């Protein structure tokens, strides 16, 4: 039996665009230009425009976007880079793979994003940069982060992998730091039909270097200037992304509307969960609609048994994963992030979710909690 309410619904999203995507793909099959070419540049131009930045460099994934940017910034062994423990694993992974020392900073207990109040205590003479994560679709509080970064000469790399179309004080996420990494993983607010990612920046030299790094460090063929990687965006994905990009704003508005329905019903029925905070500085684009409940795991099982799919983002803070055991950061090191990992629950939310479906999710929660 299929779930009554899925966590997300990509087939519904694609049904009106499928024929356009397939037409673009059959053209590609005929001309066999599968790697780069004008389709990739076209997507880069449009995405840069939407994000209000001069340069967008399309790459293979959000992880590649983070990795190549850190490579291009010229991290040296011993350098320290600060990020948060409550992100997708890739944020920390990219720092470690760059050769930098990973330093975690705990998050704000309401916004769940990097807490500027805790940031200065994490900065040492070896710190070179900070990666705030715009978690669940809401911008980190960038002004105080940027002020601290400027004072200490640090780069700011936005992890905007969950923040397509999000804003901070009216400015697009992805235009607020030295560079920003986006992911087009299928379930992201703008998703490819496979893998994809992008680096946005206003820094022409940085963009040029990342452009070379994604293609084995070459600018011209067989002229390898740097040691890079193969991290190019598939042309098939660029075609699909260009078509999907024109729907991003309408999908974003639908996500925000669905989040308003949740807020309304959770309030109206006095459901004992903590709803997401919409910070006054942010346009929250609700990549995820995340509530907190002390009975999260049991609530999740109950919803599942009633055909409602949910998610947990993220059940284990990165410093407590087996992969980072060597950092020897014991439980209790980052109390806000750790508390969130025990209580957060992501409810079904996708552009075409209906008001009735949202109401059904909330009613089912009440049946269990009240
Ligand atoms: C999805 C995601 C990534 C990684 O993106 P991929 O395209 O899957 O490599 C990195 N950071 C955050 C916050 C993400 O949500």
Image (cartoon, rainbow, N blue to C red):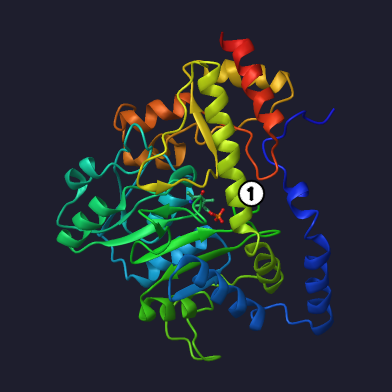
Residue drawn at 50 percent across, 73 percent down: 57
Determine the residue positioned at 80% across, 84% down. Answer: 31
Ligand 1: does it lie within 8 Å of the C-beta at label 1? no
Quick check: 4 above or below 41?
above
> 92 or 224, which lies in front?
92
Where is the C terminus found, in terms of image quarters?
top right
Q: Is residue 175 above or below residue 300?
A: below
How many tags in the picture? Answer: 1
Judged from the image, the secondary structure of the residue bearing numbered disc 1 is loop
Residue nearest the viewer, comparing 217 with 107 = 107
Q: Which residue is mark 1?
A: 187
**In the displayed structure, does residue 234 sit left or right of residue 46?**
right
Q: Is residue 250 visible?
A: yes
Q: Looking at the picture, does residue 294 appear above or below residue 350?
A: above
Answer left or right for 342 relative to 337.
right
Please tell me how crowded label 1 is: few (under 14), some (14-19), or many (20+) other residues with Cα within 10 Å.
some
Viewer-nearest residue: 176 or 237: 176
Decide if residue 188 is in sight here. Answer: no
Horizontal arrangement in the rendering, residue 354 relative to residue 224 (left or right): right
Which part of the image, by quadrant, shows the N terminus? top right
């Amino acid at each position: 039996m299929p779930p009554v309410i899925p966590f997300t619904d990509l087939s519904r999203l694609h049904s009106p665009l499928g024929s356009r995507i397939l037409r673009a793909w059959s053209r590609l099959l005929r001309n066999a230009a599968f790697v780069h070419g004008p389709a990739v540049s076209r997507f880069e131009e449009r995405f840069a425009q939407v994000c209000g930045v001069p340069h967008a460099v399309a790459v293979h994934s959000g992880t590649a976007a983070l990795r190549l940017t850190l490579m291009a910034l010229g991290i040296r062994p011993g350098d320290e880079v600060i990020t948060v423990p409550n992100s997708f694993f890739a944020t920390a992974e990219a720092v470690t793979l760059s050769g930098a020392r990973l330093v975690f900073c705990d998050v704000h207990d309401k916004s769940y994003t990097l807490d500027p109040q805790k940031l200065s205590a994490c900065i040492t003479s070896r710190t070179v940069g900070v990666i705030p994560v715009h978690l669940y679709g809401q911008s980190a509080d960038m002004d105080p982060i940027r002020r601290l970064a400027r004072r200490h000469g640090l780069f700011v790399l936005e992890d905007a992998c969950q923040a397509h179309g999000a804003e901070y004080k009216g400015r697009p996420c992805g235009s607020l730091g030295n560079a920003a990494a986006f992911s087009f993983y299928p379930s992201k607010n703008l998703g490819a039909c496979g893998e994809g990612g992008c680096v946005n920046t206003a820094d022409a030299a940085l963009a040029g270097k990342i452009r070379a790094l994604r293609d084995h460090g070459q600018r011209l063929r067989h002229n390898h200037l740097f040691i890079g990687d193969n991290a190019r965006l598939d042309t098939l994905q660029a075609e699909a992304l260009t078509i999907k990009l024109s729907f991003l704003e309408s999908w974003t508005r639908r996500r925000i509307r669905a989040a308003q329905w949740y807020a309304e019903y959770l309030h109206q029925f006095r459901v004992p969960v903590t709803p997401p905070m919409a910070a006054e500085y942010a346009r929250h684009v609700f990549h995820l609609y995340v509530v907190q409940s002390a009975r999260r795991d049991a609530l999740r099982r109950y919803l599942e048994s009633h055909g409602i799919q949910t998610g947990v983002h993220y059940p284990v803070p990165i410093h407590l994963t087996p992969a980072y055991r060597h950092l020897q950061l014991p439980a209790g090191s980052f109390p806000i992030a750790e508390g969130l990992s025990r209580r957060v629950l992501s409810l079904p939310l996708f552009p075409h979710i209906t008001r009735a479906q949202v109401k059904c999710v909330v009613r089912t929660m009440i049946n269990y909690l009240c």
